Image: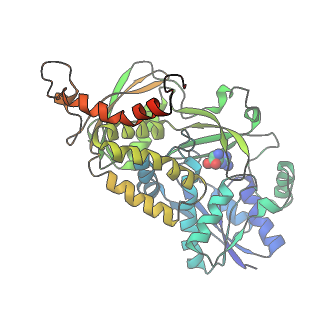
Amino acid sequence: MAKRVVLAYSGGLDTSVAVRWMIENLGLEVICLSADVGQEGTLEGNREKALGAGAMAYEQLDLRAEFADEYLAPIIKANALYEKQYPLVSALSRPLIVKHQVAMARKYGADGIAHGCTGKGNDQVRFEVSSMALAPDLELIAPVRNWGFSREDSIEYAALHNIPVGATKEKLYSIDDNLWGRAIECGEMEDPWAEPPAGVWQMTQLTATQPREITISFDQGIPVALDGTAMSLFELIMELNHTVGAYGWGRLDMVENRRVGIKSRETYEAPAALALMMAHADLEAITLERDLQREKIRLEHRYAEMVYDGLWFSPLRSALDAFIDSSQEFVTGDVRLRLEPNRCVVVGRRAPKSLYDYGLATYDSADRFRHADSEGFVRLWGLGVQTWSAVQGPGSQSS
Ligand code: ARG
């Protein structure tokens, strides 16, 4: 049994109670790690809360730039959307946090990693599988999964032990957010027929009224400038969350398949993520050779599933990243987006190595396409089904 663990500490009710609970019930020494991954809420006060709950040490890390460069950049290059929609917001911060928990465990001589996830979600899978991949020797402790506390029990436990928490007994939404977006669960939304209440949206409040165009520049698949101003990926995403979010665009309402077999209704807002991946995929349409593009699209779904399922640190991701990186060599150029209230669409794209050939595409007098070549091409292309129809058909009657 572990003696000393590093807990991923959000400062919320569950992780605060978990500190004390692990000390009392498991006899552990607890080190708390709070990570800034660009979430809205402040981490201010976390040190006092963690130490107040009995932690032997507290560390706070600003991981925003690392999150953008090492975790979001690959996702943009992969156009990774789980079940064609969800940009993997929570699935991306977990492996990064675990990487730093492991480093912290080594620094403090800890022999375990702890998290505050329940047994019903995906995040437990991501925390634990990431830890198993990076540090197979470390023990995994999931107090919230085992203690059997209701929300009221946790609040009472906190009060009993003088653990400072701001939570009230009223049922709140379960929210997880970071630089890449915001997930809102529970409450009224557990009825998949019910429309999410207006109050759940934060990043996508419609405040802008005038239509606007913005240009995003990419270098080998990575966004590097906004309207001609070069910026780090972290800054660009922050800026885009504000710019696009102000048009009330970037919301998702979906029922998704969790790794543990539950279908759950989820609402998300991710204005920058969705705008960037839309723009990136559009730029690929003019820079990727057809078969490369088709194969990449096929692998993108697999990539998203793998990340969703907690396999960020895995040989499959390394191999897929190698493929994707190689595909991005010429994905350099600009995409123009038009923003209108509740709308964001691509209105233009250009690239120095664009494969779009005006002479081949045009119907006007500049046309260079050899029309006569098509006759033989189509005859051979259809030869197989023509033969099938004649011999085994009737092709004309099959639907
Ligand atoms: N369903 C999403 C996912 O699995 C979001 C999870 C958000 N976590 C939370 N504690 N609210 O990635």
**Residue 318 as seen in the image, left or right of residue 12:** left
- Vertical placement of residue 168 versus 194, above or below: below
- Vertical placement of residue 106 versus 66, above or below: below
x, y percentage for residue 231?
Answer: 32, 46
**Residue 166 as seen in the image, left or right of residue 107:** right
Name the residue at 46% across, 33% down. 391
Res 349 seen here: no
x, y percentage for residue 387?
Answer: 41, 34
x, y percentage for residue 62?
Answer: 49, 58
- Vertical placement of residue 237 versus 68, above or below: above
x, y percentage for residue 396?
Answer: 49, 22
Q: Nearer the viewer, residue 389 or 20?
A: 389
Res 323 seen here: yes
Total count of labels? 0
Q: Which quadrant: the C terminus?
A: top right
Q: Which quadrant: the N terminus?
A: bottom right
Q: Nearer the viewer, residue 164 or 72?
A: 72
**Residue 361 as seen in the image, left or right of residue 110:** left
- Vertical placement of residue 128 versus 187, above or below: below
Query: Which image quadrant is residue 217 in?
Result: top left
